Image: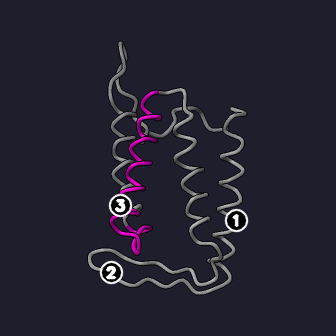
Amino acid sequence: RIRLAPFVAIGLVTSATLAYAVASGPVTAQPVGHTMHYNVHHLVLENVVVAGYLVATVGSLLLSDQRELRLLGIVCGFGSLGCFLLWKDAFVSTWCALAAVASLVVLYWLRRPQKGRAAADPLRRSQAPAR
């Protein structure tokens, strides 16, 4: 888990930067074709913040011990590159759509039956007694 520490640190700095920018100034959205373009007016070094976000999220997937999560990291990495190259002005909007599809893949992986046991239901509440 220590190898994830740099990704956690980058994620904390990125989230603090975004939180400050959103809280301190206006955020606007405009339609661009069939997507949305978001603008956080007080965000400095926008490309660095986006890169930090992607490094924290995709990088941690790529370091996973689980083959499926590494594959998800590769898919999300190439997907984010595709979103950026095809829809640079609407990257956040298209990245969110890609993340929604990736979430469905994760749900499928969690719900599929494993060797010799029934599929886990990640949406079921715990049966542990209340304290």
- The amino acid beneath tag 3 is Ala
Outermost residue, left side: 34
The quadrant in which residue 111 appears is top left
Compared to 25, does 71 lie above or below? above
Q: Residues within 10 Å of mark 1 (few under 14, many from 20)?
A: few
Q: Earlier in the sequence, mark 3 or mark 1?
A: 1
Q: Amino acid at mark 1?
A: Ala
**What residue did someone put label 1 on?**
16
Q: Which label belongs to residue 32?
A: 2
Residue drawn at x 58%, y 51% is 55
Residue at 35 percent across and 69 percent down: it is 87
Residue 24 rendering spot, x and y as whole percentages: 68, 83
Q: CA distance from mark 3 to mark 2?
A: 15 Å
The answer to whether 23 appears left or right of 90 in the picture is right
Circle on res. 97: 3
Most extreme residue toward the front is: 85
Q: Mark 3: few, some, or many residues within 10 Å (few <14, many ≥20)? A: some
Residue 12 position within the rendered picture, expressed as x and y whole percent measured from the top left: 70, 56
Q: Which residues are magenta?
A: 67-93
In front of the other: 56 or 100: 56
Amino acid type at mark 2: Val
84 magenta-colored: yes
Q: Nearer the viewer, mark 2 or mark 1?
A: 2
Between 131 and 53, the one lying in front of the other is: 53
